[in-house]
Image (cartoon, rainbow, N blue to C red):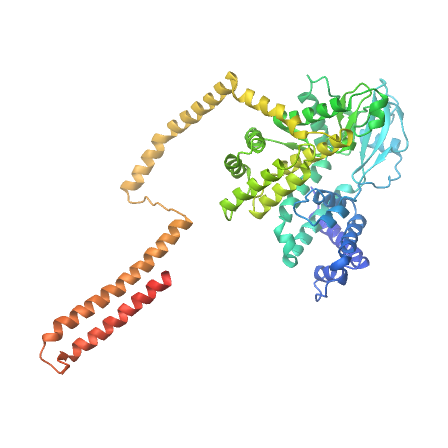
Amino acid sequence: MENPIGRQKSKLMRAAKLISILGKHGFEDLKSKITNKEETPSSADTTGDQIPLFYERIRRVIEELGPTYVKFGQTLSTREDLLPPPLILELKKLQDNVAPAAIDIRSWLENELQTDDLSHIFEQIDEQPFASASIAQVYKATLSNGDLVILKVKRTGIREMVTADLLLLKDIISLLIDYYPLVREINLPDIFEAFEKNIMEELSFQHELKNIQQFARNFSEERRIKCMQAYPELSTDSLLCISRIQGFRITDSTSIKSHQLDPECIIDTGLDLYLTQVLEHGFFHADPHPGNILVTPSGHLAFIDLGAMARLLPKDKEHLENFILYFINKDVDNLIRTIKRMSLRIHIKNEKILERDIHAMFDMIAAQSLQELDVKAVFSRFSKILNQNDILMPDHIYLLVRGIVLLEGIGRSLLPDLNIIDKVKPYISKIMARRLSPPHIIENILQLLQQLQSTLSTAPKSLIDLLHKAEQGELKVRIDSEALGALQQLQRKDSSINRYLYIAGILFLGGCLLSGVQQSTLLGIPWISWILFAVSLIFFALAGIRRMRIG
């Protein structure tokens, strides 16, 4: 069980480092807020021509703070719909490259695998890592049976450091929300929550092991892909042993040509395999950048680094299919309905404006040739429309958008005239064919019958309970609606006007009835009648004023 005192101690140590680094790079105003000192003026280099320098300083602070902040910065670098372009440009420069730690790999493996002799397991182990990142460093090895493998070794103390950083980052975000309006507008807590979940999953190599196994099962019948194989018996939470795939980056055009491979075929295969992961498996790679997609000399594709994978529930897949269908067909009404069903939070201020904005986006797409179409710009504009209406989509939607943008960039690097819309259209036909297939129709009918049977089985009891409450006078109906609330308020105001008019009428009528009474008069009318007429006029005036205020 994790020690909470130790966790807070680590957090305080990381906070001290943060304050030191902020002061070093000139963020005295933020530093003073963190230390609860008197607020000092913002740095002068945050205006005018000095803005790029300000963003560069932000990037340098993130780099110096370490892996957790670098990874969070990389996450933010994909949200071009939320952050200023100069800041996005700086965040994209963040690299998850960390100098390798000095490890006696053989001693480390003996301790981790609890063995005194590695010779019966490994034929050969490289002493130096061939890759190093913030969470792990990677070694090449050969098993005693001749299998080529890689050993992913978690850095010592990385979990404790990341946990402390996450606690501190959460506090910093709360602080930024209080002081900076921009932070309140970009849903930073929601972005952080998804990031926290992903990085904690990456810290567990057992989680990645299961991802690798499921990915291989999903593509067990697919001949165009080369899947990594895991070795569970040689893996722990801090060690991952997987098969080594010989290949080169998907963007390495020189190697593609030297192996006489067709670039267009590779791009088609890559897009098809990715869409298969999304729309058929509901389990897809969350970061398909060029370094995570390899091409083997035989032309097979391999997706590596499966620590971060996105999952879709069956209902998510159905909504996503609808979204793609309506988006491609420019069906604005159904697209908005699907967005409402998919969203986690939604507050559309004016639905007509939302419709016009989406139509304008489609007009922009229609005005460009498919070869000139900038997919990233389209998604960025669409994301801004969502943000303007306070529509928060599930995290897997943002991961999917990023994946498509990355794959489109890969495709353009190999095929400048790539038409990604044409590449997606066959999947639209496949979706429609599957939905119109007899098995799918029968499945939907059976689901409807099951829901109907469930409803009918519970309806009698619910109806009896309802009638019982009605008989006992315990039935209460509450209708909560803005329109109904406004109507009720108007009704209350009308009632008050009617009361004024009623009182005024009674007083006026009383004055008329008393006009024949023998008493002191003015102009032949008794004084009491004059008084009643005057008071009735006051109430008539009050009713008129009330009416004008409502109008």
User: Residue at the spot x=27%, y=68% of the render?
Assistant: 540
User: Residue at the spot x=72%, y=28% of the render?
Assistant: 209
Percent x, y for residue 400?
65, 34
Question: How many discs appear?
Answer: 0
Is 427 drawn above or below residue 53 in the view shown? above
- In-image side of 377 versus 506 (left or right): right
- In-image side of 167 versus 57 (left or right): left
- Depth check: 456 or 525 in front? 525
- Can see residue 229? no
User: Residue at the spot x=58%, y=43% of the render?
Assistant: 392
- In-image side of 41 versus 353 (left or right): right
Quarter of the figure with the C terminus: bottom left
Percent x, y for residue 164?
73, 48
Is 534 drawn above or below residue 71 in the view shown? below
Percent x, y for residue 175?
66, 56
Percent x, y for residue 150?
82, 27
Is 11 drawn above or below residue 237 in the view shown? below
- Depth check: 138 or 415 in front? 415
- Depth check: 214 or 155 in front? 214
Quarter of the figure with the N terminus: top right
- Depth check: 177 or 252 in front? 252
| Residue 194 figure quarter | top right
User: Residue at the spot x=84%, y=41% of the render?
Assistant: 98
- In-image side of 443 versus 204 (left or right): left
- Can see residue 356? yes
Is 4 drawn above or below residue 29 in the view shown? above
